[in-house]
């Protein structure tokens, strides 16, 4: 019996789809990190509002 990775669909999956999934996950991780940074900045501003001098 032919293994999945040896079929045309299997090769496509491992050579094209898996790398795209990995890139997408990396992009999601970067965006989540940016979102968390922005939320932390907002929380700091709410906790310590700027004072007028």
Image (cartoon, grey):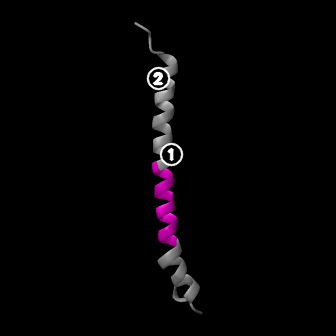
Q: How dense is the environment of label 2, judged by Cα within 10 Å: few (below 14), some, or many (20 and up)?
A: few
Tell me where residue 10 appears, x and y as whole percent: 55, 83
Mark earlier in primary sequence (2, 1): 1
Decide whether residue 25 is among the magenta residues. Answer: yes
Label total for image: 2
Looking at the image, residue 35 lies above or below residue 50: below
Residue bearing the label numbered 2: 44
Q: Residue furthest bottom?
A: 1
Query: Residue 52 shows which numbered tag?
Result: none
Along the line of sight, the residue nearer the viewer: 36 or 3: 36
Secondary-structure class at tag 1: helix
Decide whether residue 6 is among the magenta residues. Answer: no
**Quadrant housing the C terminus:** top left
Residue bearing the label numbered 1: 32
Q: Magenta part mainly helix, strand or loop?
A: helix
Residue stretch rendered in magenta on the structure: 18-30
Q: Residue at x 50, y 27 (%)?
A: 42
Q: CA distance from mark 2 to mark 1?
A: 18 Å
Do residues under tags 2 and 1 come within 8 Å of each other at their CB atoms?
no
Left or right: residue 53 versus residue 25 is left
Secondary-structure class at tag 2: helix
Q: How dense is the environment of label 1, judged by Cα within 10 Å: few (below 14), some, or many (20 and up)?
A: few
Q: Residue at x 48, y 64 (%)?
A: 22
Tell me where residue 15 appears, x and y as whole percent: 47, 78
Q: Residue furthest front?
A: 53
Looking at the image, residue 4 lies above or below residue 32: below
Tell me where residue 3 appears, x and y as whole percent: 55, 87
Q: Residue at x 50, y 40 (%)?
A: 35
């Amino acid at each position: 019996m032919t293994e999945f990775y040896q079929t045309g669909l299997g090769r496509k999956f491992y050579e094209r789809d898996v790398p795209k999934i990995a890139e997408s996950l990396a992009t999601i991780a970067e965006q989540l990190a940016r979102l968390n940074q922005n939320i932390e900045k907002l929380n700091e501003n709410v906790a310590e509002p700027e004072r007028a001098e």
